[in-house]
Amino acid sequence: MTVVTRFPPSPTGFMHIGTARTGLFNWLFARRHGGKMLFRIEDTDRARHSEEAVAAIVNGLHWLGLDWDGDIISQYGRSDRHAEIAHELVQAGKAYYCYCTPEELEQMREDAKKEGRITFYDRRWRESTLTPPEGVKPVVRIKAPMSGDRVVFDKVQGEVRVQSEQLDDFIILRADGTPTYMLAVVVDDHDMGVTHVIRGDDHLNNTFRQNVIYEAMGWDIPAYAHLPLILGPDGAKLSKRHGATSVEEYRDMGYLPEAMRNYLLRLGWSHGDDEIIDTEQALQWFDLEGIGQSASRFDFDKLNHVNAHYMKLADNQRLTDLVCDLYKIRNIEVDELGRSRLMSRMDELKSRAKNLVQLADDAEFFVKSVPYDFDEKAQAQLNEDGKYIVKVIRDNLSELSSFTAPELEVLCKSVADYHRDGKLGKVMMPLRAAITGRSSSPSLVHAMEVLGQSEVLARIDFALSKAV
RNA sequence: GUCCCCUUCGUCUAGAGGCCUAGGACACCGGAUUUUCAUUCCGGCAACACGGGUUCGACUCCCGUAGGGGACGCCA
């Protein structure tokens, strides 16, 4: 049997991080078994049908590096088929028309609440021979079993059992003839040949309802795997106030897609003590057995750590492109010279940064040119003492015939020996402030080499003329 | 409120009755390296929610309590 999974987001206009993880798991499982992952938009509700919203999800998926098989299916486009099944069930006596008014339902709901029941519909039209009231468009309800236990065998949660009394005759077709989600998922999953339903825990209860439809139609029930939810760092449901909830936000914060995949994978799935698991490895290891049963909290520290790891592995050319994209957003023009400076120091830059934004901050001085700002700490470095030593360095620098890192280091050391008791920091810090405008930077002598003699001298002159 | 699910260091987790003096990773603390910051490398702190069973033996199995999460729509 070929494995077929599905990725069925609601078109909300962005891709929630939980949706992304579910997508990743479905994708890994399908690919691992040489199967397919289908992509379906859950838009039975006409109001949800939106091209832009779909595009946002597609972009998120692309960025994450996941793909799918076949065309994107719209549930909205399949409503005739859904309605057909609903009517078939009515014909077969497994579903029926219900003419209850919203008021009647509201009343039943209140009564149920009073009695502490989970179900509320009293099935008054189930076997009714009453004449339908005038002018009321009926909904179609399915006949749910009224006694015994219902059981779901879940790949993650194990055997889950519930009493049939907990299920009522839920609606499968609305009064306007459109299908409800419950009907649409089942019909679509069946028609699309889905073998494994891997989805959020919040659907576990729905599974019992959906199985009623499968059974009424005599269809095979797929394997289920319900993933525990991702919570915010404080244990509450992950929401906007925790920071980022959508994958595009993580992209904008400078995380790499391969790092997100690794982090998301480990959040709720494990393979012994392995922590760094790249996608290639995951494709060989992923299984449903490794999925944990409890909800997990999103931890930025760990994400940062994983991301830093993948930053070090990333291709320099690619990182340079990504950083230049960030500079573009910052309105910083990067010419060929700037690019080549970035490239030549990328090995060091990427080993220092936890994410792209940090890398961009760290390397900004490479792409800026002479009038630039000095941050507070840099200004403090350029006091009388600082300026004095920078001036000394400047005089020596201008006479240097070979402007390379080793020689620059020797020079700085000798200046430190001669003027500052051998304390190299006393020399480097003011110099760093002058050249980069900041109090911390990558290796200064290497940076100077890359910047070149005339640029370094120009920067020093600028700093000396400007600093207080 | 009713039903369902969950419960190992602060966090992510390993653990399928004796391998556990409970392992790893992140974070944190200390040390080494370093021109700053960061990296890197060592070392340290830190958990089986609680109460009952079952068993020669329970982190592992069962029951209960507490806590957390989810579901209860003509939403998905």
Image (cartoon, rainbow, N blue to C red):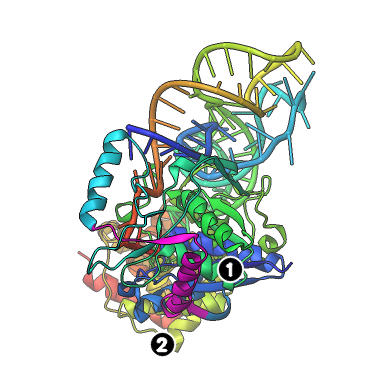
Give the extent of the magenta segment. Answer: A72-101
The quadrant the N terminus of chain A occupies is: bottom right
Residue neighbourhood size for the residue with mark 1, other residues' Cα within 10 Å, grouped as few (<14), some (14–19), many (≥20): some
> In the image, is residue A293 above or below residue B43?
below
Relative placement, left or right, of A49 versus B19 is: left
| Residue A94 colored in magenta in the image | yes
| Residue A414 colored in magenta in the image | no
For the residues beneath circles 1 and 2, the answer to whether they share a chain is yes
Q: A25 or A348: nearer the eye?
A: A25
Q: B55 or A257: nearer the eye?
A: B55
What label does residue A335 carry, if any? Answer: 2
Q: Nearer the viewer, mark 1 or mark 2?
A: 1
Task: Tell me the subunit letter for badge 1.
Answer: A
The residue furthest bottom is A336
Q: Position of residue A331 (x, y in %)?
A: 30, 80
> In the image, is residue A315 above or below residue A417?
below
**Amino acid at circle 1:** His
> In the image, is residue A297 above or below residue A314?
above
**Amino acid at circle 2:** Asp
Residue at (41% x, 70% y) in the render: A360
Q: What kind of element bears circle 1?
A: helix
Q: Which residue is mark 1?
A: A190
Task: Tell me the subunit letter for badge 2.
Answer: A
Q: What kind of element bears circle 2?
A: loop
Q: Quadrant for residue A453, please give it.
A: bottom left
Q: Position of residue A349 (x, y in %)?
A: 50, 67
